[in-house]
Amino acid sequence: MITVTMSKPFLSLLTFSLLLFTSACLATRSEYDRLNQCQLDNINALEPDHRVESEAGLTETWNPNHPELRCAGVTLIRRTIDPNGLHLPSFSPSPQLIFIIQGKGVLGLTFPGCPETYEEPRSSQSRQESRQQQPDSHQKIRRFRKGDIIAIPSGIPYWTYNHGDEPLVAISLLDTSNIANQLDSTPRVFYLGGNPEVEFPETQEQQESHQQRYSLPVRRRGGQHQLEEESEEQNEGNSVLSGFSSEFLAETFNTDEDTAKRLRSPRDKRSQIVRVEGGLRIINPEEQEEEEEEQRSEQGNNGLEETICSAKIRENIAHPARADLYNPHAGRISIANSLTLPILRHLRLSAEYVRLYRNGIYAPHWNINANSLLYVIRGEGRVRIVNSQGDAVFDNKVRKGQLVVVPQNFVVAEQAGEEEGLEYVVFKTNDRAAVCHVQQVFRATPAEVLANAFGLRQRQVTELKVSGNRVPLVHPQSQSQSH
Amino acid sequence: MITVTMSKPFLSLLTFSLLLFTSACLATRSEYDRLNQCQLDNINALEPDHRVESEAGLTETWNPNHPELRCAGVTLIRRTIDPNGLHLPSFSPSPQLIFIIQGKGVLGLTFPGCPETYEEPRSSQSRQESRQQQPDSHQKIRRFRKGDIIAIPSGIPYWTYNHGDEPLVAISLLDTSNIANQLDSTPRVFYLGGNPEVEFPETQEQQESHQQRYSLPVRRRGGQHQLEEESEEQNEGNSVLSGFSSEFLAETFNTDEDTAKRLRSPRDKRSQIVRVEGGLRIINPEEQEEEEEEQRSEQGNNGLEETICSAKIRENIAHPARADLYNPHAGRISIANSLTLPILRHLRLSAEYVRLYRNGIYAPHWNINANSLLYVIRGEGRVRIVNSQGDAVFDNKVRKGQLVVVPQNFVVAEQAGEEEGLEYVVFKTNDRAAVCHVQQVFRATPAEVLANAFGLRQRQVTELKVSGNRVPLVHPQSQSQSH
Amino acid sequence: MITVTMSKPFLSLLTFSLLLFTSACLATRSEYDRLNQCQLDNINALEPDHRVESEAGLTETWNPNHPELRCAGVTLIRRTIDPNGLHLPSFSPSPQLIFIIQGKGVLGLTFPGCPETYEEPRSSQSRQESRQQQPDSHQKIRRFRKGDIIAIPSGIPYWTYNHGDEPLVAISLLDTSNIANQLDSTPRVFYLGGNPEVEFPETQEQQESHQQRYSLPVRRRGGQHQLEEESEEQNEGNSVLSGFSSEFLAETFNTDEDTAKRLRSPRDKRSQIVRVEGGLRIINPEEQEEEEEEQRSEQGNNGLEETICSAKIRENIAHPARADLYNPHAGRISIANSLTLPILRHLRLSAEYVRLYRNGIYAPHWNINANSLLYVIRGEGRVRIVNSQGDAVFDNKVRKGQLVVVPQNFVVAEQAGEEEGLEYVVFKTNDRAAVCHVQQVFRATPAEVLANAFGLRQRQVTELKVSGNRVPLVHPQSQSQSH
């Protein structure tokens, strides 16, 4: 054996290498988890991880790296838009499903290839300061209100405006694992204009540490055409138009230099939700009620084939009259899927609105063909989720603002609290999501099979099959009363 | 240079860290393989890796981590159910295709939203011990027998019962990479009741070592509602109902405490296949033959649109009269796809039954749009598989009970042995799987092109194109006789 | 503290282990990148990485491991076929879209299950050396020429022949991430015959190093049936037929030993593109012009349902009369998608041909539902691409032969050079790829919203919405002239 003499630098190198490997291998482990991404021993209720404050609102996002969200292949955004606030035009390669928790607003999409079929109403009279010779035209503006589900296809830019008196609150699902998203599973929101702040810093940081590691040149590249000034320009602004030089934008859109510079909005401090001073005048409050009436009657025409240009993109699922399942003692459930809102066929998404009254139970069931994301709107209750090994991976109270992921086929049951009811929306990653209730399996299975499977006596099986409601909404007291 | 003094603990830490990295990085390598999962230099014939013995049968599974199975994105289960054995209701997020190798039985599915259209025949007369006031009703019971292909959609619970005199043997494909499975590629079987043993211990162990590594709390969590007793309850039982407390089950299903406890079946030792003492009485042997006749005539109605509630889920493909390709000297092939069994369109799966007579050859061919899984039912033979580089990745004898994966576009040829024929079923991961035969390419290609491609003389090309059968089933002797 | 004595072997082991981990973890890192495969800080214009020279042509391929190509999930092949050159029959599990850059030729596919509907014209008269008794029959031969897009479904074998006077140049997209490819993302080309050289050595090397690491037996396996001679045979040849023994081929195809040996082509030095001495006689130059005429008139029948056997697989998109967007000052664009060429619905691919005149601009736009691959055919220009963070990830000159990947939703603008125009083809990974133009968003959005989003005055918004062409093809000079 030899007494070793090791140079200190060598030892440091060794230690340093180890540190290096640690970080590399940790990356590995996270990948390992990703590929076994639904082996969830434990599901947590998730609240937003990050917030971006804007001039006229707030954007809160969930970190897409939560194991639960990686399993479901989605992430979520909650936006609060102040009265007269305008959420700037943006688009995403992932389809989005938005539920309006509170307030009312208008929304404009640009469907490519569709005509501008709306002219601004009475523009010449109501706006004498306008110097334009011809009335302004644009694509359809769509009103929405609390309880609406809104479908935004991938790549379609849309803007939103709060024309009500209270904050507009919306929760959006971004289905990053949707077949329509041909990029990786990182959530991406492209803002056409403005100077938005980063909404998913987790994915951003990853990228930056990655850049540092390889020290790749970012942003400061370009051919010989590129002037020093342009290169500087490109360091500012986060909208897609800020990525082009103002010279090029002026040339392309045939505008003056000042307009082009404003299109790039490099130093705009208002972020993604901006205030409209005095409000948007195109929204005429008098016409509003009538139009809403009209829209509601329109809702009946779903069966007919629609062109994408006039496609209905919203449906109210919170209104009591809209309930698909109802028990006066326990609660009600409404479903929006591609049968009620055909555009959902393209998005491969659907939604469910559930309201449980005090102590009301949504009996054990599972989604046969979808992952589901339960977001609590109001009240409190308890949720139980069981995996394929019979383990209760979630058995906790939930409250307003929390998100719970229920993976495909995991068995779930919800119960409202004793003091207040429970109101939640469920996003589902299938446009024809279907649910199987344990109670229904009991009914559909011959009594003899049940008796042998569970070691029950005939009387017990009969009780199991016959008692209880057909509706999987149960109220403990009411039931024992009615029998 | 400095003589280093290293503390012993530091050194151990170093060594320990290295060990840690080793395991982390090995995980990596397996992931690396996964992403290049079809670079198979070598394909092996696979036999089941694991067995679970139950009261009235046997479950054998293939380890889904075999490179061949990871490439195909599937795994398999072989179940043997004794006479009067009942395989408990279960469901899986992956669609399943089952082939009945031996025996006969009945099967019940629960299609959610479908009515209970069957009443138990003559229940009042044949069963005087029954105290129920009203006859038992349930969803349709379906009979099946040797040679049937049965389709089970994802998330749909089903039970199976052997009402014959010999063991019922079935081989099932679980298509974990199917678009219908929105979880990861781990095979999962959810048992509604009973106390099943783990069927895929490989994926289980992975999970447990994972748990240990992070020491996450498992099973023993829950809000303040949860009593100590419940927590203990949750440590037992592997069915999904065992994940709920008996108190909650009693409340939800409006049953007494004893029934609720039995639903959780925590200490049931019978495992997933249980014995029905005296047999199921709902299966009337006298009616059986008639019904089978009926079912067969029903088979003609495939072209018509069906609702899912009355969908046909089975088709017999082993009967000689059902052959789609036939050579009296070499063998026969039958195909079940979404044209013959429309429900397969939803499963995106199809199957082929092949019977080769002694020395019969199924000439070289490839699956243009599917991976295929060849399972040998009876006899012995030889299979050759060639990859894109012209390497014979498999060239071996195969025997009863072996599974061979043939990846998409890999060229394959089968030949029955000299002493007995070869009988096998092929599962394919496409509901309209199509095959291209080398012989057909010869016929479809102009003689001049073949002559130039292979350096053949005109006479040789003519011989190649004209000789041989149209059917890709060849018998060496018979052919040379007929010419 | 203890003075440590470390044995030298232990230290070496430690160092060696570290080296081992380095390589393992590097593999990891590349996987890490793969799963975040579209976090592209920087996009590069790509030229072919590898070339295979054959007797009568050249095959050039792009390394599929470029981050840009991994993001898009595709790779490309450029083939140059000399006059009288024949590209041997091959097939791939990934669907292919081919654009003919130069020259003209014929092509034969084998659609399985389709009849041989062509008899060789006047074979008895024009070819007295032919000794065949009956005329040769084969599936339809299809002519093509410069500007054609050709669709090859997955698994379908096809051959190509240059019957013109100049080299035939074609660029092919292989969509390895297409749902039709059920293997991993490695590009694979299976040659039926000949002795092709490896076209994607990068994936090959990976495999070989992998083999070495595990020292798996390759090629030299097989059951007891296998003679020593066969085993040697299998070491030669890269076509799929070379993977079978000549004895087995003779038996199966009922041919003599010499024919069988030639089918295996083990020592063919001509590689994948071979010379046809004297040219293919089945191509009658006199009939050619007429037929082309016919084919063009045929093009109108797209709306009708076609069987796959007679499906049209090509469409000319370069002809000026075919333009879908046109500005006489700036350029023209033609689109081939599943509405104009129905077979593309099965391939889930489409293509665009763009010709920009000198200084012409294709204004900023994005692909809402597809990744796109821009290949420069002729001329030079500049391309700008902006990601979701507003960074210009590409802003460079491009020239003939370069490939630029534009990921889904990334905003892109092209401009032809000052001295010559720019001509390029764009492959898109969606059969109904749709584009949204920034200019159209301006028009579709109410003036007030634009004014508030960008801080523009009313006059500037009006200018932005009204000025410029409807067509997103812009010529800076011509526009300022016309206004």
Image (tube, coloured by chain):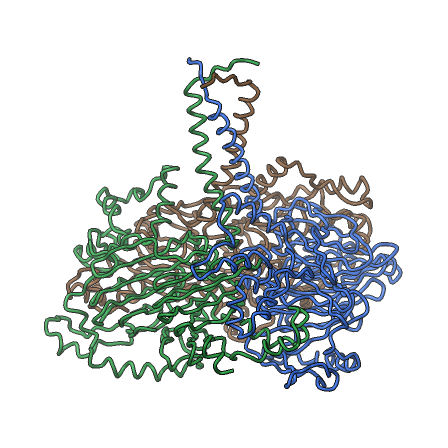
Chain colours: A green, B blue, C brown
Depth check: give the residue in front, A368 or B164: B164
User: Quadrant of residue A48 in the image?
Assistant: bottom left
Query: With C417 as the anchor, is B199 left or right in this view?
Result: right
* Residue C209 visible from this viewpoint: yes
Write the residue at 47% across / 81% down: A481
- In which quadrant is the C terminus of chain B drawn? bottom right
Depth check: give the residue in front, C36 or A360: A360
Residue B123: x and y, percent? Answer: 71, 84
Residue C240: x and y, percent? Answer: 69, 49
- In which quadrant is the N terminus of chain B drawn? top left
* Residue C134 visible from this viewpoint: no
Residue B98: x and y, percent? Answer: 69, 65
Give the number of marks: 0
Query: With A12 as the anchor, is B85 left or right in this view?
Result: right
Depth check: give the residue in front, C149 or A59: A59
Q: Is residue C289 above or below residue B10?
A: below
Residue A295: x and y, percent? Answer: 32, 81
Query: With A273 as the anchor, is B413 left or right in this view?
Result: right
Depth check: give the residue in front, C64 or B469: C64
User: Quadrant of residue A118 in the image?
Assistant: bottom left
Q: Residue furthest left?
A: A129
Query: With A125 as the anchor, is B121 left or right in this view?
Result: right
